[in-house]
Image (cartoon, rainbow, N blue to C red):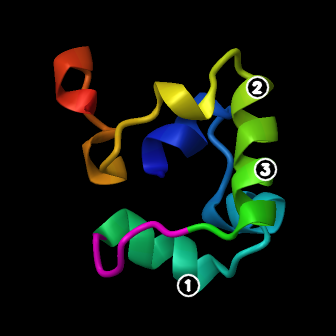
């Protein structure tokens, strides 16, 4: 999620939380790997809107978002 925040222009955890409809604590837990990233349908749709704004799609994300920080595309699946 930190990489996603960077791609979205360096937005804060608070901004991403607001955009996805989750709490800042949830974003922090996802980024620290405390809890797995899980989204409701409305949250997934919000994520898709955010990704679309930067020319990406949910399909571009790895199955394990903890690998999203990797610069190697081979590590993203």
Res 43 quadrant in image:
bottom right
Q: Which of marks 2 and 1 is in front?
A: 2
- In space, the residues marked 2 and 3 are separated at their CA atoms by 10 Å
- Report the Cα–Cα distance between label 3 and label 1: 20 Å
- Identified at 55% across, 84% down, the residue is 25
Q: Nearer the viewer, residue 43 or 41?
A: 41
Residue drawn 63% across the image and 21% down it: 56
Image height of 26 relative to 15, above or below: below
Q: Name the residue under label 2.
A: 52
Q: Residue at x 51, y 69 (%)?
A: 38
| Residue 52 painted magenta | no
Q: Can you say whether 69 is above or below 25 in the image?
A: above
* Residue 23 image offset from top left, x and y in percent: 68, 81
Label 2 and label 1: CA atoms lie apart by: 25 Å
Which residue is depicted at the point 63% across and 26% down?
A: 57
Q: Give 61 or 22, whichever is nearer the viewer.
A: 61
Query: Magenta span covers which residues?
Result: 33-38
Q: How many labels does the image show?
A: 3
Q: What element carries label 3?
A: helix
- Sequence order check, earlier mark of 2 and 3: 3
Of mark 3 and mark 1, the one earlier in the sequence is 1
Q: Residues within 10 Å of mark 3 (few under 14, many from 20)?
A: some
Does the CB distance between marks 2 and 1 fall below 8 Å?
no
Q: What label sits on residue 45 in the rendered view? A: 3
Tag 1 residue: 25
Q: Mark 2 or mark 3: which is in front? A: 3
Q: Badge 1: how crowded within 10 Å, few (<14), some, or many (20+)? A: few
């Amino acid at each position: 999620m930190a990489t996603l925040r960077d791609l979205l222009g360096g937005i804060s955890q608070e901004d991403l939380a607001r955009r996805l409809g989750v709490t800042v604590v949830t974003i922090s837990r996802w980024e620290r790997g405390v809890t797995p990233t899980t989204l409701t349908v409305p949250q997934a749709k919000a994520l898709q809107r955010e990704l679309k704004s930067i020319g990406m799609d949910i399909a571009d994300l790895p199955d394990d978002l903890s690998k999203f920080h990797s610069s190697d595309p081979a590590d993203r699946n």
